[in-house]
Amino acid sequence: MPADANAYGDIFGGWLMSLMDSAAGLVAARHSHGRAVTIAMDGMQFHAPVHIGDEVSVYAQLAKVGRTSMTIDVECWARDRHRDDHRKVTEARFTFVAIDQDRKPRPVVVE
């Protein structure tokens, strides 16, 4: 939407980062069977701009599991609403920690 863009019509990187964090958080919560919080984001790279009106798709995949942490790779792709081709616009690696009701780290449930 226009409110999410700069004066040139490109979507703010922070808006994309928020979508990516949400996608990674869903993977972390599902894998750990509970609450998990973002503790780091590494390797954020912007490859191409996202324009107002583009369709945005975010894909997140569990890359590594530690005792209390999970590393999740996330890619964001965009497609012009009137075309079929799509392009990778950004990617990053997120680290989440599973936490308990006291907000203290807890072991990740092994599936």
Image (tube, helix red, strand yellow):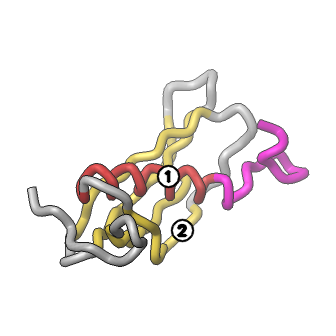
Local crowd size for mark 2, using a 10 Å CA cut-off: few (<14), some (14–19), many (≥20): few
Identify the residue at image location x=76%, y=49%: 10
The extreme right residue here reads 7
Q: At which x and y percent is residue 91?
A: 47, 61
**Residue lying at 36% horizontally and 52% vertically, measured from the top left:** 60
Q: Quadrant of the C terminus?
A: bottom left
Residue 74 can be seen, yes or no? yes
85 relative position to 48: left or right: left
Q: Secondary structure at mark 2?
A: strand
Q: According to the image, label 2 marks what residue?
A: 45
Q: The N terminus lies in which quarter of the figure?
A: top right
Q: Is residue 45 left or right of residue 105?
A: right
Residue 22's tag is 1
Is residue 8 shown above or below 104?
above
The nearer-to-camera label among 1 and 2 is: 1
**Which residue is outermost to the front?**
102
Residue type, mark 2 in image: Gln
Q: Is residue 27 above or below residue 64?
A: above
Residue 103 sits in quarter: bottom left
Q: Main secondary structure of the magenta part?
A: loop
Q: Is residue 94 left or right of residue 21?
A: left
**Residues drawn in magenta:** 1-15
Disc assigned to residue 102: none
Position of residue 110 relative to residue 10, above or below, is below
